[in-house]
Image (spheres, helix red, strand yellow):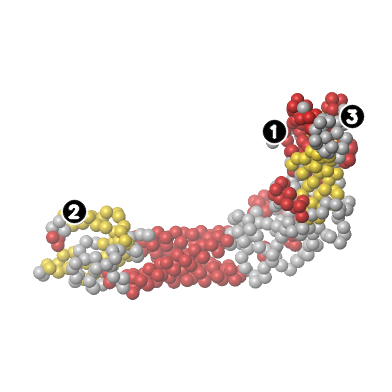
Amino acid sequence: MVIDLHCVAQELDDVGKRCGFDGKGHHCHKGILARCKWIFNDIKKRRALKRLYSNDSPYAHYRLIITGHSLGGGCACVLATMLRPSFPSLKCFAYEPAGCVFDEQLADFCEDFIICIVRHDDIVPRLSPANCDVLRDQFFEVMARVKVSKIKLFQDLRTPCPESSLARRNAAILRPKEFVNHDTAFYQSLQARRNERAEKNRCSGPRLYIPGRIIHLVDLYGDDSQYVPYWASKYEFNEIILSDRMASDHRAHVLIDILKDIRLDRMDDVIPPDRQLFQPIVINETIPETQARHFTCFSMPKRKCTWALAIWISVALILCFVMNNSCEFFTRDAVVSINGTEYAQPIMEFGLFSYELKRYTNDNGYDSTFEDTGICAPFPPAFHQDGYMIAARACANSTMVFGSISFALAWASTLLNLGRRAWRSLAMAALVATVCQGCVFLVLRTDLCTEKRNPLEDLLPDSASCSLSKSGKIAILAVCLWFLAAVGSLWMSRRVSAVQLDSDPLKISSMWE
């Protein structure tokens, strides 16, 4: 990285005199040259090549080949130029090298012994100070053409756009180039910055290019299934292409697999006309661009409606989880009569799957007092589950299942532009969760809340009643949230058209065309 940052041109006069080539008037990447000087001196100090190509060496008849990838590819090009006077048959293969190595004349001179290979949209062979200036100028030029507020622009750019709708979307947020007001303070400062940068570039030396002959591997269909190699010009890499694969195309191990599957001995100077790089884009003006499927985190294709719906469902699901794991769903009061005297039994807190333990504070027979321990314990094996308890537990588990489905679909709606069927499925799942959550209150009809014998006690109470506790009130709130989620999903399904498109990923560079 430090070597790459030294991207200024340095003269090769002294280096050429030492290595045996004419470097007068030629320039090279300063950082790469510094690294190659160290390598060259180390090779000379260790006498490695002299031993390999001595008369007694079995490798004396071998051709010297220098290779490298990325920054190593740039170093390989420079080192090959330094060693070629001593090894005229030398060849260099640079894989995806840095985009600024030699000046224009020296880059052309190296075509006899240097071959560079570049994969599709790889950003590294296109990185140079001049290209970065072009990218910056294009960005500010687009900003000068924006005719909407920056907040609206930011919200719009968060959602990718299919190629078929890109022109229409750009027309909605950008004014034509000929209508840009050049008298504004922003444009004047932009022009002043351009002039200042251009002057600095002229003073810093000539523009640097990729050296030698260049093989450009073009992904024919955009899915890595077939690559087309052709001889490219160094001027084709004078612009940075912004795409979703500009970084991944720089992977060396993938490039090796690609090179194994293609024939580099059958290449043209240009791509044959019968093998188009991309299919022509069909612009369909009748279908709104928002109907395309997208996958961008929190892009909210349907604006803030999906965000609110996802929050409701998330809160409802959390409340259901708390309710199922709580032992305070309902409170049971019971009174027993012993020899004509009524005694109030301790108030018990029960949940669907557990109950709260009590502790004696005053052992006084039937008139003992208890205190809460705050500890939840599962029901003992001897506990008899009647039909109401079984139904309540089944409904609680069903709520978690359908709630999880609603949760997944709701948050997917913040990433993808869901169609009508997906919204109806979300509404149905939320509605089923609403019904199941409401049926949980069947637990209030169990034996614990009637005058039947309580398996946890030894006495048959004269009367017993139950009232909702903390988790029971939470369950009521969850029912309301599930119902709102169902209604909201149905409302969203009515707004969505049944037609959906499979869109291509947005290439930001198209905004500058």
In the rendered picture of this protein, how many numbered marks are placed on residues?
Answer: 3
Q: Residues within 10 Å of mark 1 (few under 14, many from 20)?
A: few
Q: How far separated are the C-alphas under marks 3 and 1?
A: 28 Å
Q: Position of residue 326 (x, y in %)?
A: 35, 59
In the displayed orientation, state which residue is furthest to the bottom.
Answer: 387
Q: Position of residue 16 (x, y in %)?
A: 86, 28
Amino acid tagged 2:
Thr
Say the numbered circle drawn on residue 362. Answer: none
Relative to 371, say whether 461 is above or below: below
Q: How far separated are the C-alphas under marks 2 and 1?
A: 74 Å
Q: Earlier in the sequence, mark 3 or mark 2?
A: 3
Q: How far separated are the C-alphas under marks 3 and 2?
A: 102 Å
- The residue at 31%/57% (across/down) is 376
Which element carries disc 3, helix, strand or loop?
loop
Say the numbered circle drawn on residue 22. Answer: 3
Say the numbered circle drawn on residue 361. Answer: 2
Q: Position of residue 472 (x, y in %)?
A: 36, 64
Q: Give the residue number, with chain letter if any, for mark 1.
A: 2
- The residue at 39%/64% (across/down) is 475
- The residue at 12%/68% (across/down) is 338
Amino acid tagged 3:
Asp
Labels 2 and 1 touching (C-beta < 8 A): no
Which element carries disc 2, helix, strand or loop?
strand
